[in-house]
Image: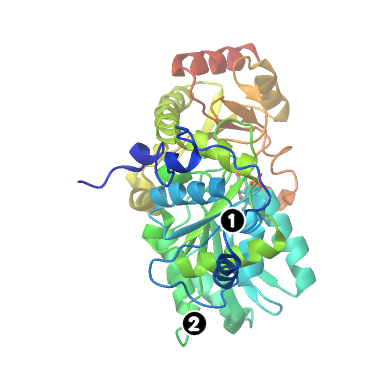
Amino acid sequence: MKKMKPESLMMSYGYKPELSEGAVKCPIFQTSTFVFRKAEDGKAFFEIAYGHRPKHQGEEQGLIYSRINNPDLEILEGRLCLWDEAEDCAVFESGMAAITTVLLEFLKPGDLLLHSSPVYGGTDHFINKILPKFGIQALSFHPGESQASIIRRVQDSGLADKLALVYIETPANPTNTLIDIRGSKDIARHFSKNGNDIPLAVDNTYMGPLWQHPLQHGADLVLYSATKYIGGHSDVIAGACLGTAALIGRVKVLRTFLGNMASPNTGWLLLRSLETLKARMDIQSANADKIAAFLNQHPRVEKVYFPGNLRPEDSEQYEIKNRQCLSNGGMISFDVRGTEKDAFAVLNALKLIKLAVSLGSTESLAEHPATMTHVDVDPAERALLSITEKMIRLSVGVEHYEDIIEDLQQALEAS
Ligand SMILES: *Cc1c(COP(=O)(O)O)cnc(C)c1O
């Protein structure tokens, strides 16, 4: 039989009803520990879990304890692998837990981290405020900086031989500027030596598992805040990391000892969410195209930041989009004419669209990056990245696009 599409497998993959009284849905395995049939089983499960020996042919990792494994998490991880065509996945209790675990696993004192800027505020804080306490330094580059210039700056830092991880977030939040995944891996390769491959990690939260597949463009690790598109209902905080079995094996060992795995209930909520991931994201992307078209022609809107607005004359950004993005996404930022006061007036006049941070959920959300999500970014840096005081960031939901447009129209005209 032909290989089925992920959306067809989201209701069944990896779940055996006969092991759960025939329940059509995977139950919440709300249990801390699992009974071993015999002592020899417990011994074998621990040998594999702690990496003391490889698995025998056909041997499966048995269930031990919910900090190590749990059916809700294992089934969820199997299903997430389908979208990104990854070998393995580790799920976490938050996106930040996934990101920080990867940074801690692949960096050690004395190492250098190369990362794109801007990155998510929490990630930025961890890189610049927490990692230095462990003697780990970071060097950042902006979207648009040439590969040659980035390589030169790494060399000039005197830490080129200490470069241990490249980390990017694309599209950049909130401006939707794209970073070349393939080009970033080229930089990592440039500094890799003696078979010591420097991994590239990509925070793919903004495009979600449908609209961009970083592993296919050279990334080694994909990270998600599953709070966003994957969860999609603004009712759960969660994270995920995907990649090869070898790399995710390392991530899972650290997860076991940090104890920041997702709970059974979180796993169950995300299994529910994955069933509609494709349907939700299809609507959000179609809505975003229509809303961007509306904003593009509105006289009170000065500038719209949306990948769908890229044209061949934007050369590099346009090429990156065509190479690595399968959609324009569901996130739109726009500058209203005027100042912060005018942006606030629009936000305060919205009725259907909720004034809240976060993104990727069923309901449309709007916020003001300069004073909310990106308030911690240095003002000079904010100016450089064109995060203006008149910018509004919109996360497009699944409502009827005419209602979203009407809400934006009345808010733009009331203010
Ligand atoms: C929200 C977000 C995170 C952090 O995820 P949490 O689930 O809130 O911990 C990381 N990266 C991006 C791009 C995000 O939008």
Residue 132 position within the rendered picture, expressed as x and y whole percent measured from the top left: 76, 69
Mark 2 CB in 8 Å range of ligand 1? Answer: no
Q: Secondary structure at mark 2?
A: loop
Q: Is residue 388 above or below residue 155?
A: above
Q: Is residue 246 above or below residue 354?
A: below
Tell me, yes or no, if residue 222 can be seen here: no
Q: Nearer the viewer, residue 323 or 81?
A: 81
User: Circle 2 is placed at which residue position?
Assistant: 196
Q: Would residue 261 be found to the left or right of residue 205 on screen?
A: right
User: Circle 1 is placed at which residue position?
Assistant: 69
Q: Would residue 158 be found to the left or right of residue 331 on screen?
A: right
Which residue lies at the image location 70% right of the left edge and 65% below the top edge?
257
Tell me, yes or no, if residue 21 can be seen here: yes
In the image as oriented, which residue stretches furthest toward the front? 38
From the image, state whether disc 1 or disc 2 is nearer to you: 1
Query: Residue 334 shows which numbered tag?
Result: none
Mark 1 CB in 8 Å range of ligand 1? Answer: no
Q: Is residue 303 above or below residue 103?
A: above
**In whole angstroms, how far apart are the C-alphas of marks 1 and 2?**
30 Å
